[in-house]
Image (spheres, grey):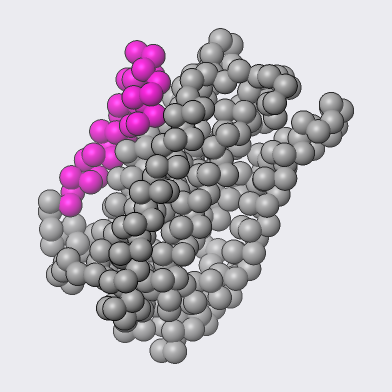
Amino acid sequence: MEFTFDLNTIWFILIGILLAGYAILDGFDLGVGALHLLFKKDEERRIAINAIGPVWDGNEVWLVTGGGALFAAFPDVYATVFSGFYTAFMLLLFVLIFRAVALEFRSKQEAKWWRQMWDVLFSVASIVIALLMGVALGNIVTGVPVGADKEFAGSFLGLITPYTVLVGITTVALFMMHGSIYLVMKTEGEIQQKARGWVNNTIIFFVICFVSTTMATLVYFPHMTQHFKDTPFLFILALLNMLAIANIPREIHHKKEFKAFLSSCASIAALLALFAAGIFPNIVISTINPDYSLTIYNAASSQKTLSTMLTIAIIGMPFVIGYTITIYWIFRGKVKLDKMSY
């Protein structure tokens, strides 16, 4: 389908930006959680937790905003996805809550068993969140059984396939890479050296998963490449992604952690841009009949609603961005433990 820059497309891009912002910001603290148990000392684990402590809840604002934007712009997609993926979303909500509880409760007692219990729950919850998000993205690629009435006609177990699990594992690997770089940037001394040693290993883990996922996509879901064939210029997204990933070990080697982190952010943004370009203009592809797929046109709100909500978004987005920048500026620098720390 030919690209048309209209209100529907603008909202598709805007929701993509919000979800990319969430993946970039919450991705590193999910990655820190996934790596958490690799730290053996209590002080090291506290430093890792406090590296994300001031910002993790603010990062999730981007997810809430993205969900709200999806509801406003594409209500049929919101209804179909949230009802069809109900079990998965309830599980996601459960682990999100448990992860937050683990962060808050861990340091309430000094007993070793108490802290170990919450450490395990925090790490497992972080991995499960990343995995579920990847599985959801995988299902968007493969398509789901959506009928003519725009209702989901499948089951929770039907969403779990080798491909969607592969995408889920790739997402976990991506966030682990992102989180290890963030730890190098926010820590110093022995703990920083440990995190620095993890960066290359997580990059290798991610690259293996990414290549495997890409090959599986090209073989089994060629529709994801159609726009790239029609518009070769889009291949620059893949090139930028590869360059961003390749630049990470270079910047880490030169001890330029912030530049390495920016490269990691760029790789996540490029990956999601590749995903968005692949599915456009579809949002939910129907495996029952392609004509039943939910697109940015047949699942959208009225043009008046899209226009009004865009005005609200233009007014509101600077507050979200400003809040995020302010928090990161206030809590910049290396992590130091004090009596107010987790």
Residue 200 in which image quadrant? top left
Residues rendered magenta in the picture: 234-263
Q: Residue drawn at (35%, 68%), measured in percent from left and top?
A: 309
Above or below, comparing residue 175 to residue 91 in the picture: above
Q: Nearer the viewer, residue 214 or 338?
A: 338
Residue 55 in which image quadrant? top right
Above or below, comparing residue 19 to residue 300 in the picture: above
Q: Is residue 14 visible?
A: yes
Report the number of numbered marks: 0
Q: Residue drawn at (49%, 83%), measured in percent from left and top?
A: 151
- Residue 112's spot in the image, x, y percent? 84, 27
Q: Nearer the viewer, residue 150 or 314?
A: 314
Name the chief secondary structure element in magenta.
helix
Q: Quadrant of the C terminus?
A: top right
Q: Residue furthest top?
A: 189
The reply to whether the magenta stretch includes residue 300 is no
The reply to whether the magenta stretch includes residue 245 is yes
- State left or right for residue 172 relative to residue 92: left
Q: Residue drawn at (29%, 52%), measured in percent from left and top?
A: 273
- Residue 58's spot in the image, x, y percent? 53, 44
Q: Is residue 201 visible?
A: no
Residue 57 in which image quadrant? top right
Above or below, comparing residue 26 to residue 330 in the picture: below
Q: Quadrant of the N terminus?
A: bottom left
Q: Residue drawn at (57%, 20%), measured in percent from left and top?
A: 335
- State left or right for residue 210 relative to residue 341: left
- Residue 196's spot in the image, x, y percent? 49, 19
- Residue 314's spot in the image, x, y percent? 31, 57
